[in-house]
Image (tube, rainbow, N blue to C red):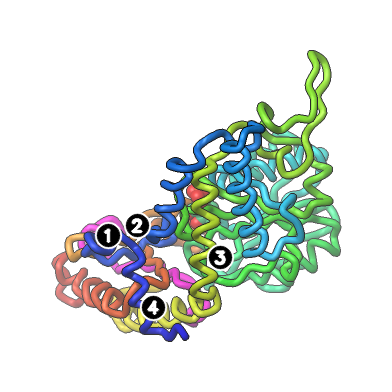
Amino acid sequence: MTNNNSFDAHREDFPIFSDLKDAYLDNAATSHKPYSVIEAEQTFYERYNSNPLRGFYPLSLEATNQVELARDKVRGFINAKSTKEIIFTKNATESINTAAFSFCTGNLKRGDKIVVAVTEHHSNMLPWRSAAKLIGADIEYLKCNNEGEFTAEEINRCIDERTKVVAVGIVSNVTGRTAPIDLIVQRAHQAGAVVFADGAQSVPHMKTDVQALDVDFLAFSGHKMLAAMGVGVLYGKEEILDKMPPFLTGGEMIDSVTLDEVTYAQLPSKFEAGTLNAAGIVSLGTAIDYYNSLDIEKIRQRELLLTKRAFEGLSAIPNVHIIGSSDHTDHAGILSFTVDGVHPHDVSEILSSDGICIRAGHHCAQPLLAHLGVYACSRASLMFYNTENEIDKFISSVSTIRQRMGYKDV
Ligand SMILES: Cc1ncc(COP(=O)(O)O)c(C=O)c1O
């Protein structure tokens, strides 16, 4: 039975912690990797290295087998119906571009509307804007209030009969707030629109069931959930993906090619042009084994407890303001904040000098920060392997910042 404190023991599964003395609170940017994941990637190159999905000799067949095993683990992790619905890309950004260009060119016309949440990371905003421009479709932004919340009134106002796509992140990488996906899906489907969910900040931290959520697409990155960099996932409902044109074209995504004609391969190959990052994909399968061994529900509880501690500590520091909800349970491991009179880069440097790694800047969400009236902020983001001591060290360092910047009224 894994209790909250026993999670500390799992730090030993991560080689980086034997050297790294800093408190790593930048997990929304990328997570660390356990030994098993690093070994899985290395083992692929040591034992199975060959181009998957191409050769008919045993080594290539085994490489294919390894990739397909990982695909099935991903399917199970998000409860997709079929492995045909799991497309490997290089990251969430590529997954979003694939869906945006392919779905929009295949299904939208001039004058249609794409709704994008104002909370989105640039990766889930710019591809939709580019696709809209190409087609002559309109973009409308689903706005949140000052606490990062989408109201039912705003959802109903924004999504209408002209809407063909709604692009929204499940968890914001700035406010940490979880979007009301059920309301959004219900309204979008009523209007005849598909829902594209960015799961980059949710899939690593909470149970994801694409069938229960009923989203039409979901994107996420392996590197934020313990796996190697360079592997991402695009989930899409089979019946929708089937009708979409490919995004990238080239090797291994065709059935036949003549000088004049091409017929494309079945799913998922149709969307996997070129050689895959097979070792990275295998590492993602192993990362999912690791998640399953800990239990994602327990991981979530652990992260919520750490978040509460960090939230309460930060809230008690004068002149420090947390962005988003005033309820810690809305923060899902992400705490963005400002310190009056201190630039977030200075905040980050001071914390760094105390051995704490956080992120500062606009977090690739400039429109959201402008909407919230904040030009930049600092962000601490947690993972189950963080400890209460790390949180306390972070709080204690933040509490000294204004004094160290020369303010008398700390
Ligand atoms: C919410 C969200 N979406 C998309 C991305 C893009 O992820 P990647 O850089 O792995 O493509 C990020 C990265 O931080 C993110 O936080």
Task: Give SS at disc 1.
Answer: helix
Of circles 3 and 4, the one toward us is: 4
Of circles 3 and 2, the one toward us is: 3
Locate residue 374: give its quadrant: bottom left
Of circles 1 and 3, the one toward us is: 3
First reached walking from the N terminus: tag 1 or tag 3: 3
**Residue 132 at least partly seen:** no
Query: What numbered label is drawn on residue 360?
Result: 2
| Image marks 3 and 4: residues in contact by CB distance under 8 Å | no
Query: What numbered label is drawn on residue 202?
Result: 3
Residue segment shown in magenta: 323-351
The spot of residue 238 in percent (x, y) is 79, 52
Of circles 1 and 4, the one toward us is: 4
Decide whether residue 340 is among the magenta residues.
Answer: yes
- Residue type, label 2: Ala
Who's the residue at 49% across and 52% down the image?
283
| Image marks 2 and 1: residues in contact by CB distance under 8 Å | yes
The alpha-carbon separation of the residues under discs 3 and 2 comes to 21 Å
Q: Nearer the viewer, residue 304 or 380?
A: 304
Residue occupying the far top of the picture: 259
Residue indicated by mark 1: 348
The spot of residue 46 in percent (x, y) is 43, 42
